[in-house]
Amino acid sequence: KAAEGEVLQLGSQAEYKGKKAAIAAALGHEVNNADTNLEENILEAEIGETGLVLSHYPKTHLKRWHAVPPVKPIGGSPGEMGKQVNIPIEQEKVMLDKFQENQFNLMASDMISLNRSLPDVRLEKCKVKKYPDLLPTTSIVIVFHNEAWTTLIRTIWSTINRSPRPLLKEIILVDDASEKEHLGKKLEDYIKTLPVPTRLFRTENRSGLIRARLLGAKHVRGDVITFLDAHCECTEGWLEPLLARIVEDRTTVVCPIIDVISDTTFEYIQASDITWGGFNWKLNFRWYRVPEREMKRREGDRTAPLRTPTMAGGLFAIDKEYFYKIGSYDEGMDIWGGENLEMSFRVWQCGGRLEIIPCSHVGHVFRDKSPYSFPGGVQNIVLHNAARVAEVWMDEWGEFYYAMTPGALNVPVGDVSERKALRERLKCKSFRWYLENIYPESQMPLDYYYLGEIRNAETSNCLDTNGGKSGQPVGMGYCHGMGGNQVFAYTKRHQIMSDDNCLDAAHPRGPIKLIRCHGMRGNQDWTYDAQTRTIKHTNTGMCLDKPEEADVWKPVLRPCSRARSQQWLMQTEFKW
Ligand code: LR7
Ligand code: MN
């Protein structure tokens, strides 16, 4: 039995690789970090007070650090402590003109100190949390295209001012073919004056954020890569919890809570800690409320790591070796979009995990529109990137994407063979596994009988959401056969779904609405009878019927009969 305090190097002992139990048995101690990933190589084992602690990190890679004191507010300077900045009314016109360029209030940003103070938005429990004395170093990678000066430089200063210096290996900037004067020589000169080693790389041609990040990652010297957008502000204690989680298990990809920096006032607004990442049928990233299930798993501890199905994409930290092992990024993706879902699915399906660390808060300027060009067209690029996600990772659930986004069929996906080979090589699990185990609350039904248009036999019109949001009535329209608003899934849980909404009838004579699917049957429970072709609403016992004369575009419920107007065709073959 090994002695307390003893450190054992396990790197070369092949027979121990990834076998926690074997190591424990050999050393005669219980493993106390039971949560670490079994698949990974364990390099070091230490006999601590409470048992055996296994680590992916050799001690020589770790650094001793101390918490950084808070940044003090500068008296009289606008926006201190994250407060909003208001532009005097007489300057409003100039302000609006300047807004266009970045799609945020540049005039406000320019008024705020590059070192502005921010509120400490952490939960009290976070402030007193103890992290290991030794943590790995990180390189911060920031890519940008035509970013404004003050937002970029404030991002840099907020990392310098709020990261323990021994852990901050360097800052790596990647200029993705910007055309702005201030990002040329001025930036090169400026970064030489910074107290943390900062290097600037430039893409030769506009590469998009995915390939720009790959360029930055190539130069990383730290053990962990931390990606940030170029308009962020890190708050007190943001870095330690991220690195501490990675050191526990380097197959964990970690995100801070992303707080909101207002695009109009630059106010720092705390985001919810009960929100996680999901996605809809169009493969847009979406925030959703964390389900009870995950709250329970964390035993109600709001400071515990939150397992999130997907990430927003811009702000996260990952062990450098693991970044490459798990397949870095899909180089076939252009400009913007898709890479966040791609990495999310890949990490989960290939044995890693993705977490939001609630004790880490970083602000980001959220904007309504993209300020820069998308060479080749926004639609083409976004659809192309998302199609690659669907093709490689989503198996048959990729159909939801194509059904909902018919335009995607006309956009070439390009060669995905390398990414598929990666999936094979890493022996990644199926999308079904992901939906069952990681994201049972997903908007994509696990089991469904049908996906397509639902056509009325008498009128030959189709159910149509008209793009309506939750709470609006479902409509009818001429069947256009193009999917989108006329695509519905009939699921094994007896729902008729369109994206994250379900057909819902609260009253026998009331409207049939689209309501967020709750998965609890109730008003959302329907049964399709393939023989009679009726769609029966369970709670009311009524059948879905064509619209009344008065409102020809709204289907209704009527007592079930054999009427042709109550027959509905689901065109393609049922799966079971
Ligand atoms: O061609 C480009 N080259 C670049 O270098 C296009 C963009 N970029 C840079 C850009 O200057 C910025 O620094 O890439 C970064 C991200 O671009 P944004 O800020 O325009 O993107 P976003 O904040 O609207 O979008 C989110 O989704 C993107 C999908 O590709 C990326 O993953 C972003 O990093 C991501 N941002 C966040 O996760 C912050 C939270 C937003 C949310 C939700
Ligand atoms: Mn951004």
Image (cartoon, rainbow, N blue to C red):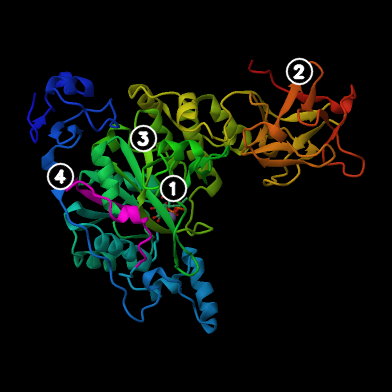
Q: CA distance from mark 2 to mark 3?
A: 41 Å
**In front: label 1 or label 3:** 3
Question: Could one spot residue 207 in this view of the protein?
Answer: no
Q: Secondary structure at mark 4?
A: strand
Question: Could one spot residue 380 in this view of the protein?
Answer: yes
Q: Is residue 482 left or right of residue 369?
A: right
Q: Quadrant of residue 485?
A: top right
Query: Counting other residues with Cα less than 10 Å from the Cα at mark 1, is it few (<14), some (14-19), or many (20 or more)?
Result: many
Residue 474: x %, y % from top left: 75, 41
Q: CA distance from mark 1 to mark 2?
A: 46 Å
Q: Farthest residue toward the right?
A: 549
Badge number at residue 530: 2
Is 307 contained in the magenta span? no
The magenta segment: 118-145
- Name the residue tied to disc 3: 353
**In front: label 1 or label 2:** 2
Q: CA distance from mark 1 to mark 3?
A: 26 Å
Q: Amino acid at mark 2?
A: Ala
Q: Secondary structure at mark 3?
A: strand
Q: CA distance from mark 4 to mark 3?
A: 22 Å
Residue 552: x %, y % from top left: 87, 41
- Name the residue tied to disc 1: 335
Sooner in the amino-acid sequence: mark 1 or mark 3: 1
Sooner in the amino-acid sequence: mark 2 or mark 3: 3
* Mark 1 CB within 8 Å of ligand 1: yes
Q: Amino acid at mark 3?
A: Arg
- Name the residue tied to disc 4: 62
Residue at 19% of width from left, 68% of height from top?
A: 193
Residue 206: x %, y % from top left: 39, 51
Give the camera-side residue of 124 and 121.
124
Vertical comparison of 442 with 220: above or below: above
Q: Secondary structure at mark 1?
A: loop
